[in-house]
Amino acid sequence: MQSTVLNISLNRDSEEPIYRQLIRQVQTLIDSGMLSAGTRLPASRDLAKQLGISRISVVNAYAELRSNGYLSAHAGRGTFVSREKASNNPITAPQRAIQQQTNSTQSIRDMMRLARKPGVINFSHGSPPKEFFPVRHMQDAINSVIDRDGADALSYEVPEGYLPLRVAVRDYVRAIGIQCRFEDVLITGGAQQAIDLVLQALMSEGETLLTADPTYLGIMDIAHARRVHIQGIPIDEDGIRIDALENYLHDHHPRLIYVMPSFQNPTGHVMPIHRRRQLVRLAERHQIPVLEDEVYREFRFDGEHLPPLKALDESGMVIHANAFTKMLLPGMRIGYLIADGQHYDRLVRVKQAADISTSGLNQRTIHTLLERGVLAKQLERNRLELRRRRDAALQAAAEFFPEGTSWFSPEGGLYLWVDLPHDGPSAPEVFINGIQMDVAFAIGSMFYTSDGGTHAMRLNYGIHSPNDIREGFRRIGDAWRDLSMNYDNVQKSPML
Ligand SMILES: Cc1ncc(COP(=O)(O)O)c(C=O)c1O
């Protein structure tokens, strides 16, 4: 039996030891399905020669991969990808699914750390453009708050949040169609905490959360931390598929549905009004709460705004989450939830248990920025600049990405979701090669609750100038072409 050729790329300048890089990359190849169970790995001497490293590094890496169950050795026959790894575990099926997914996401994430290398044009972040943060306004606002409120601004706040900010949020969401009272507003530590609180308040360990597949990475983190089973539902260009959701609900009883109706992360899709209505009706019929995450709502630069799900909700099934993070200042960590009485009291109790209250100083500062009209100006500026950057990204994608690549043209948000040709190198392979060329992106498979996205990339065009977008996309195209030449050779090799 011939051994396979391993597509490994080591970084000698990295602080991470070579044998650790090797372990990580072999794990990624196995987790992503690129190396299947039973595949024979090259002998340590051959791999050391192929990679130009010492044999002892390979021997150590193989030993650790054997001890953590990724590989198995058979005397005289060689080293193989383990078949037993998952199936030997005396754990339940949902736990195994959670564990397998955590392992695979973890090793891809480990790989993503390479993107921190200085000089890399990095499209992998989820941040809005930093150069436009209203830093001076924020400094003035903090000073005004401290002058006005003194020690009160630095004391404990009530868990529900600083009252004038809750009133301002009520007015803001009323303007987008959500009929609520300030008593329905709970201030949180960003949208991330808002989501986490909802999971804690509504779900118990082992229960099922439904989400679109692919979905926001952070919801997977929360689900894993809270030991909740996460089930992905397929999507189309209008978002989560209602027929697939209905099928699932026919036989199962999930506790919560999580969706991003506007500029879904990672795909950039927007749920049209008819799909929003269908989803709300379905949730009502099945009495399943829906958590809508609208953090990208205000990043629309083409087309019309649509009402949030909460504006269509007549039975209190929808909980609305948003934040002044992406749209204003992520580091201030101010977000909010809008929930009806049936959920609200429980959410406040969980919030109090989590951190007593969100920083009073930060809440007051954001409130002052809202009063001074800074948010409106910031949104306008973001829209203009993001449209310019989106256009640059679409142009560069058409120019530099290989034939057969497809992408979704977003009307807003920060991301371009790209699918490379499926008969060529996968996204993790292109990522590793791209790092050598000083470019990085988010690997698509990270955003899937199970398999999927092997050739997908998420590119945050929002954080780069049009020139850097062009240069970065050119490098990605080069990384793909460079690999694809070797790829063709490997595919044609009689060894495989
Ligand atoms: C869809 C989505 N929801 C929530 C968050 C978290 O946002 P925040 O900074 O408000 O916690 C992010 C951040 O990337 C996101 O993409």
Image (spheres, helix red, strand yellow):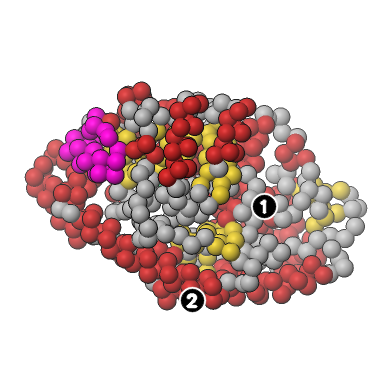
The relative height of residue 16 versus residue 240 in the rendered view (above or below) is: below
**Residue 341: % across, % down:** 32, 24
Query: Which circle marks residue 471 in the picture?
Result: 2
User: Residue at the location (44% across, 72% down)?
Assistant: 392
Left or right of 174 on screen, residue 151: left
**Residue 409: % across, % down:** 48, 62
The relative height of residue 289 versus residue 78 in the rendered view (above or below) is: above
Tag 1: Cα neighbours inside 10 Å, few (<14), some, or many (≥20)? many
The relative height of residue 282 versus residue 100 in the rendered view (above or below) is: above
Question: Which amino acid does the dot numbered 2 rest on?
Answer: Glu
Question: Which amino acid does the dot numbered 1 rest on?
Answer: Ser
Left or right of 257 on screen, residue 321: left
Quarter of the image where the C terminus is located: bottom right
Cα–Cα gap, marks 2 and 1: 28 Å
Q: Is residue 428 visible?
A: no
Asked whether residue 182 is drawn in magenta, I would say yes
**Residue 9: % across, % down:** 65, 66
Q: Which residues are magenta?
A: 160-183
Query: Which circle marks residue 32 in the picture?
Result: 1
Q: Is residue 123 visible?
A: yes
Quarter of the image where the N terminus is located: bottom right
| Quadrant in the picture for residue 157 | top left
User: Residue at the location (19% across, 51% down)?
Assistant: 369
| Quadrant in the picture for residue 317 | top left
Q: Secondary structure at mark 1?
A: loop
| Label located before the other in sequence (2 or 1) | 1
**Residue 163: % across, % down:** 19, 35
